[in-house]
Image: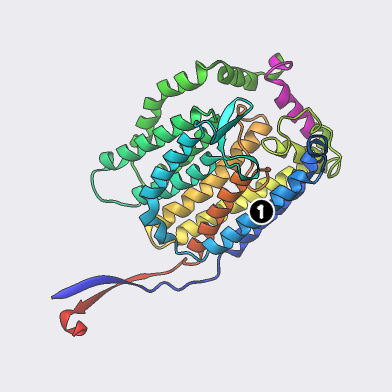
Amino acid sequence: MDLKFFIDTRRSKEPDLIFFLAILTLAGIGIAMSYSASAVFAMKEFGDSYYFLKKQSLWFAAGFMLMLVLKEIDYRGYLKLTKIMLVFSFVLLALVFVPGIGHSAKGSARWVGAGALSLQPSEFVKLFMVIYLAKVFSSDKGDRFVQILVPVLIVSAVFLMIMLQPDFGTAMDILAVSVFILFVSGFPFIYIISLSIISIPMFYLLIYLVEYRRERILAFLDPWEFRYGIGYHIIQSFIAFKKGGLFGVGLGNGAQKLSRLPEPHTDFIYAVIAEEAGLAGTVIIAFLFLVILWRGIVISSGAQDNFGRLLAMGLSLMIAVQAFINMGVVAGVLPTAGIPLPFVSYGGSSLLSNMIAAGILLNISRYRGAMHQEVNLHEGVLE
């Protein structure tokens, strides 16, 4: 009688250095720009111009430690945790609506906790969804229709719960990354086309029939027609780009962040960079995200199992898609959606979730080119 089992013969290598340096560079730029974009507001509101700088530095320290820990933890261990992650995701998303636990700001119920311990669950749910989808779509067993049905229902439920907060930007980010993971997993393209067609009525109901979202789309098409209303902020972003020119007005010298741009240290920090560091600064930021996407693809292609391949691609896309949505919104290429720039915008939840993703990617990169050997052992060998 032959006994078959797998012996892990993978050899741990050094993590992807280029990816690691790109992450640290972006985080370093983020700390500097968070201070520049928020110093005046922080002094006015809290009497301390370093208020946001201190908090962002603490979040970065926590995220950096998490990244270092996670790069040492075998990514295959997450396969056993996907059910727990799913339950945890729905619990977190439900808690934002519970009085005394969840809290609102500017009309959106997106946070749980209070003060320094306030977190935005959707940032972590996004990470959990990537891990879950990587596991589901890495399997080639069973009927393809059945295999896609449950994930579609789960992603739809998460999408709707986030839209109820409301957080249109994060909901669309999760949806886009889910579609990309489905595409790279090798599912027939007809599935994606069919899902897109089926989704059209839902988007009509959730976007066009909701007045403020419809106005955002109209303002995107012609912001100057709404220059005294919903188009005001994107026009101020355009002005920031124009003032910045090629090399910018200098760090800390921007004027658009002073009551003109909305959330200059979070959603619109890319416009602050455009004014203070110019076109050169914005190109460097975009280039660094392209490097992250490139190295993510390299890490994915070097993974020796489907789960690692899809997980690396999904996490890379999670970071890159969010980054390019943010930059597209600020540059007027996409309709306005409140979504932070990964590693750069101020915010503990965003920074922590992306540093966690980076740590997992670094771990996958350590096993590039590794092999699994199937060994046949005769019963007598065990005697």
Membership of 236 in magenta stretch: yes
* Residue 155 occupies quadrant: top left
In x, y percent, where is residue 34?
74, 44
Which is more toward the observer, 320 or 61? 61
Q: Is residue 206 magenta?
A: no
Residue drawn where x is 61% and y is 55% of the image: 63
Looking at the image, residue 72 lies above or below residue 84: below
* Three-letter code, disc 1: Phe
Picture quarter with the N terminus: bottom left
Residue 278 visible (yes or no): no
Residue denoted by label 1: 60
The residue that appears at 18% across and 80% down in the rendered structure is 378
In this orientation, which residue lies closer to the viewer: 142 or 213? Answer: 213
Residue 219, horizontal then vertical, whole percent: 64, 19
- Residue 72 x %, y %: 51, 66
Quarter of the image where one finds residue 358: bottom right
Residue range (magenta): 226-241
- Left/right placement of residue 353 relative to residue 30 reads left
Q: Residue furthest left?
A: 1
Residue 75 visible within the image: yes
Q: Is residue 345 left or right of residue 42?
A: left
How dense is the environment of label 1, judged by Cα within 10 Å: few (below 14), some, or many (20 and up)?
many
Instruction: Please tell me whether the stretch drawn in magenta is mainly helix, strand or loop.
Output: helix
Judge left or right: residue 131 versus residue 65.
left
For the C terminus, the image quarter is bottom left
Q: Provide the secondary structure element on which disc 1 rests.
A: helix
The type of colouring in the image is rainbow
Please provide percent x and percent y for residue 241. 77, 34
Total marks shown come to 1
Residue drawn at the location 45% of the way across and 19% of the way down: 205
